[in-house]
């Protein structure tokens, strides 16, 4: 896969591209990541890349020519061109999975009050936001997108199993994990994980995954088709949370007396 990042701040990406799992994927030539400085494509003698908005209003708008020229310098028929903007559709694992199948991705990082809309209309295939909050620019969002895609590419993670259990990959949040020591500050690791009984362990993990998802992201439970075993587990989880809240109410009432 090839990824080109069009940005006014290419230096923000240096450590990100070199470090850890992304760095390893680059070294193994599984992915090529280039940063292109949009300012290099300004024809203006002061290398300006922004201008005042037509119609007035606060802030500056990124001019269309430097962005268009930067896109043209890397684009081919196979390129998927994505603009990172808080106005985009909200990024999720499903989008990451689809993007990991692309050959060439171009990520355009916006700044100021955004970019001239003619560029968006004519040259952008998709607009992505990484959540409902505003960042000063698209760079951190671009890093989130690159990271989530690259880790899915074959050969990047050592253990191919490792992303199928991830939170979100199968539409649920991940079960809790533990490592040594067996007792830490008086807290023990759940007994079942030490049992060596893999059927029991898998069942426990399936239950815990369902439970944490039900508690934190009921919307994900709604969206998912549960198998028979999960449906039974969910009934049990609902029952025990109702009992727990009854217990809590009793406790609260007791405390009031
Ligand atoms: Cl993609 N860009 C900016 N500037 N802010 C954001 C974002 C992107 N996603 C969430 N907030």
Image (cartoon, rainbow, N blue to C red):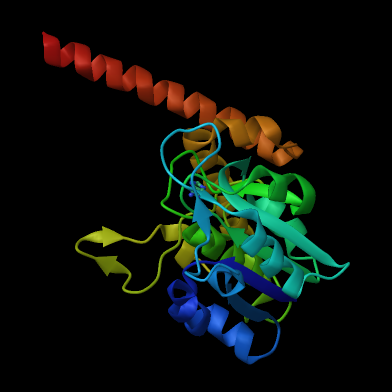
Residue lying furthest left in this view?
257
Q: Position of residue 252 (x, y in %)?
A: 21, 17
249 w.r.t. 73: above or below: above
Q: Where is residue 18 in the image (x, y as percent from the top left)?
A: 50, 84
Task: Say which residue appears at 44% left-offset and 80% top-offset.
Answer: 15
In this view, the residue in front, 186 or 119, is 119
User: Which residue is painted at 78% across and 70% down in the image?
Assistant: 75
Image quadrant assignment for residue 177: bottom left
Percent of width and height locating residue 187: 26, 59
Q: Quadrant of residue 202?
A: bottom right
Q: Nearer the viewer, residue 47 or 128?
A: 47
In the rendered structure, the answer to whether residue 70 lies left or right of residue 76 reads: left
In the picture, measured across the screen, residue 212 lies left or right of residue 104, that is: left
Question: Is any atom of residue 198 visible in this view?
Answer: no
Quick check: 121 above or below 99? above
Pick the quarter of the image with the N terminus: bottom right
Furthest toward the right, the residue is 77
- In the rendered image, the residue lying farthest to the front is 45
Q: Nearer the viewer, residue 162 or 77?
A: 77
């Amino acid at each position: 896969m090839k990824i080109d990042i069009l940005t006014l701040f290419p230096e923000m990406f240096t450590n990100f591209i070199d470090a850890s799992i992304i760095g390893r994927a680059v070294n193994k030539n599984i992915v090529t990541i280039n940063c292109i400085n949009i300012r290099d494509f300004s024809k203006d003698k002061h290398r300006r890349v922004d201008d005042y908005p037509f119609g007035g209003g606060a802030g500056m708008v990124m001019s269309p020519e430097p962005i268009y020229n930067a896109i043209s310098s890397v684009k081919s028929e196979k390129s998927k061109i994505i603009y990172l903007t808080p106005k985009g559709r909200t990024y999720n694992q499903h989008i990451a999975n689809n993007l990991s199948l692309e050959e060439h991705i171009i990520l355009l990082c916006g700044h100021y009050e955004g970019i001239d809309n003619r560029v968006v209309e004519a040259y952008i295939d998709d607009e992505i936001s990484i959540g409902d909050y505003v960042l000063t620019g698209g760079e951190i969002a671009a890093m989130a997108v690159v990271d989530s895609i690259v880790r899915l590419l074959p050969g990047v993670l050592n253990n191919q199993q490792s992303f199928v259990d991830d939170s979100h990959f199968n539409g649920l949040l991940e079960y809790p994990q533990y490592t040594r020591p067996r007792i830490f500050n008086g807290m023990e690791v759940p007994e079942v994980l030490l049992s060596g009984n893999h059927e029991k362990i898998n069942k426990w993990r399936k239950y815990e995954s369902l439970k944490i998802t039900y508690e934190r992201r009921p919307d994900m439970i709604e969206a998912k088709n549960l198998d028979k075993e999960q449906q039974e587990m969910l009934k049990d989880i609902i029952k025990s949370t109702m009992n727990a809240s009854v217990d809590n109410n009793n406790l609260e009432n007791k405390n009031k007396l």
